[in-house]
Image (tube, rainbow, N blue to C red):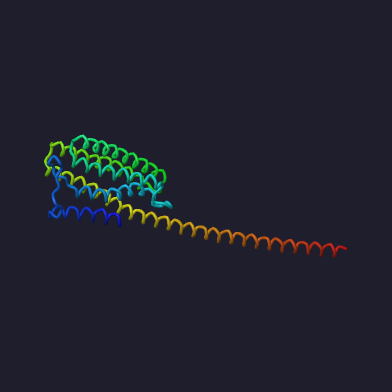
């Protein structure tokens, strides 16, 4: 829940600041307006989303993150992707701008590779079917939605769409992405509570069955001991009668 609050709070503050004009307009060397507030937002929220993808399948494991080093590398490539994308937004399609664009695209591919590896590892260790489905769906949505951001970026900076169109489409995709992750986190928390409750009930039932089995075994042992006592008493009486008969005959 804290991740949901953080992701949506950062987005709310950024959109509120942009809506009221609290953030000054910044332009690239080619005169294109650059929404630096979006890049600031992504630098803070996308690491949380990567954490969600890396940890969702480990709710019942000892550690939320299987490989911390790989997680850190994912964050590194993610931040590199955003910063070089921002640099390209300022420099446009100059020689240096092309370099930053290529680095940003390469970083994006690395991020997708790292996330796919983390999801496969999480799926191999999940405890519920819900987590498998959630991870698969989130992976698909992440690839589709995150791919739209660079496409929209290129459409705007090549002059194929206006800044208004760029702003509307970017906002829609951004809000859709955060809504999906927020719903996944909230429903995942409730599902985890249900799973833990079910496991606890199963544990209590197993303990009850175990106690019942012990009672049954105890009763069976008592019955066996009673039968042994009866058999011993019967044997003793027969022996006494046999000795009495022998004595009488003698």
Give the farthest residue toward the right: 250
**Which residue is pictured at 13% across the width and 37% down the height?**
159
Which quarter shows the N terminus? bottom left
Q: Quadrant of the C terminus?
A: bottom right
**250 above or below 89?**
below
Quadrant in which residue 161 is drawn: top left
Image location (x, y in percent) of residue 64: 39, 51
Residue located at (60% from left, 59% from top): 220
* Residue 92: % across, % down: 18, 38
User: How far from the left and from the top, in percent, is residue 144?
Assistant: 25, 40
Q: Residue 21 occupies which quadrant of the picture?
A: bottom left
**Front in this rendered view, residue 175 or 103:** 103
Q: Is residue 77 left or right of residue 127?
A: left
Of residues 164 and 116, the one drawn nearer to the viewer in this rendering: 164
Q: Nearer the viewer, residue 25 or 3?
A: 25
Count of labels in the image: 0
Q: Residue 127: give x, y in percent of width and height.
A: 41, 48
Q: Observer-nearest residue: 244 or 89?
A: 89
141 relative to 63, above or below: above
Please give the name of the residue rendered at 14% of the width and 52% of the height, measured from the top-left corner.
24
């Amino acid at each position: 829940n804290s991740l949901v609050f953080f992701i949506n709070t950062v987005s709310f503050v950024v959109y509120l600041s942009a809506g009221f004009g609290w953030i000054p307009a910044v332009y690239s060397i080619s005169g294109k307006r650059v929404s630096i507030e979006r890049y600031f937002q992504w630098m803070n929220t996308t690491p949380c989303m990567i954490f969600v993808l890396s940890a969702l399948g480990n709710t019942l494991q000892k550690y939320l993150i299987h490989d911390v080093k790989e997680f850190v590398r994912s964050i590194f490539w993610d931040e590199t992707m955003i910063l070089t994308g921002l640099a390209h937004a300022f420099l446009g399609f100059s020689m240096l701008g092309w370099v930053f664009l290529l680095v940003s695209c390469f970083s994006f591919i690395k991020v997708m590779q790292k996330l796919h590896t983390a999801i496969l590892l999480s799926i191999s260790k999940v405890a519920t079917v819900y987590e498998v489905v959630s991870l698969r769906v989130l992976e698909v949505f992440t690839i589709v939605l995150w791919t739209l951001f660079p496409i929209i970026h290129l459409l705007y900076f090549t002059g194929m769409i206006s800044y208004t169109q760029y702003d509307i489409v970017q906002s829609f995709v951004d809000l859709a992405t955060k809504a999906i992750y927020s719903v996944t986190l909230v429903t995942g928390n409730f599902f985890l509570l249900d799973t833990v409750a079910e496991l606890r009930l199963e544990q209590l039932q197993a303990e009850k069955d175990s106690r019942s089995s012990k009672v049954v075994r105890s009763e069976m042992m008592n019955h066996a001991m009673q039968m042994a006592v009866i058999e011993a008493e019967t044997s003793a009486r027969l022996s006494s009668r046999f000795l009495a008969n022998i004595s009488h005959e003698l």
